[in-house]
Image (tube, grey):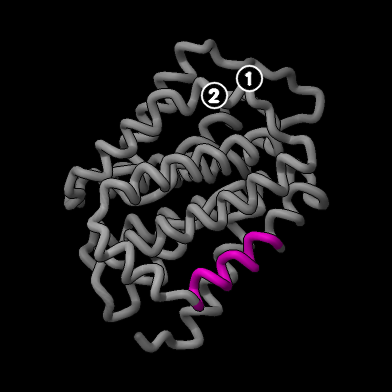
Amino acid sequence: MNLEPWLIIGFALVAVGYSMVGHGGASGYLALWAFTQYSADLGAVTALVLNVIVAGLTFILFQRAKHFDFKFTWPFLVLSIPLAYLGGSVPMDSKIQSGFLALILLYSAAMLVVRPQARDESLVPPSRTASVAVGGGIGYVSGMFGVGGGIFLSPLMILLRWARPHTVAALSAVFIFVNSLAGLAARPPETVAKAVELWPLLVVGAVGSLIGGWLGSRRASSQTLRQVLALVLLLAVGKLVMKTLGL
């Protein structure tokens, strides 16, 4: 399968930008994929494979930078994994649902920009029940849309002051990693094999995640991460709008 240079470069840039905030980049890959002649099913599976690679490497970098908190993270994973698998088994063709999610993400992006978190603003960690419920719900939705779920989880956690942006990025990376694996398990093996054949995209995704993950975990401030996350959300909105309009 011949891949055009613009697609490879685009995937690399998406991996850098998304990994800075602990994301795998599925929504960005899918937005670029929409401009190719390849099938949507192959695009969704390719995005999930890249999610596993990018989010996995990004998690390692944030964990080594000591931003990962296992006790805070595990309740979000309990229900998200099985529900991501179930969501991945459900056909997702609802344009109305895509439009609704686009509005939610657009609002989240705006709030991240116009309501920056103050340095001395106290955190309000969620209860374990809330963490389990939110993780499960986002896991199911992420499985339906073929994304890792960080695009929904990260802004929610930051806007509700559940954790600092670096901690959120580390949690999102592992959340996306495990849920993308669960989503892949629900996909046809032959389609997964075809996605693996697109190895140039996987290689540039891995390299991009190493660059972005290092910048996000070691160099970027919390405010910078919020701004990058807002940009990531806007890219996701663009993808959802395209889906809603049938483009």
| Residue shown at the point (49%, 35%) measured from the top left | 153
Q: Position of residue 217 (x, y in %)?
A: 75, 47
Q: Main secondary structure of the magenta part?
A: helix
Task: Report the front residue among 223 and 25.
Answer: 25
Mark 1 highlights which residue? 71
Left or right: residue 168 compared with residue 183: right
Left or right: residue 101 compared with residue 12: left
**Residue 99: in sight, yes or no?**
no
Residue type marked 1: Lys
- Residue contact between numbered discs 1 and 2, judged by CB atoms under 8 Å: yes
Give above or below for 219 relative to 203.
above
**Residue 179: in sight, yes or no?**
yes
| Residue 208 lies in the magenta-colored region | yes
| Residue shown at the point (37%, 44%) measured from the top left | 103
What is the total number of numbered labels drawn onto the structure image? 2
Label 2: few (<14), some or many (≥20) within 10 Å? some
User: Image quadrant of residue 45?
Assistant: bottom left
Q: Position of residue 7 (x, y in %)?
A: 46, 79
Q: Position of residue 35 (x, y in %)?
A: 34, 77
Give above or below for 175 relative to 76.
below
Residue type marked 2: Trp
Left or right: residue 105 compared with residue 221: left
Highlighted magenta segment, given as a residue range: 200-210
Give above or below for 199 relative to 112.
below
| Residue shown at the point (44%, 19%) measured from the top left | 132
Task: Report the front residue among 148 and 118.
Answer: 148
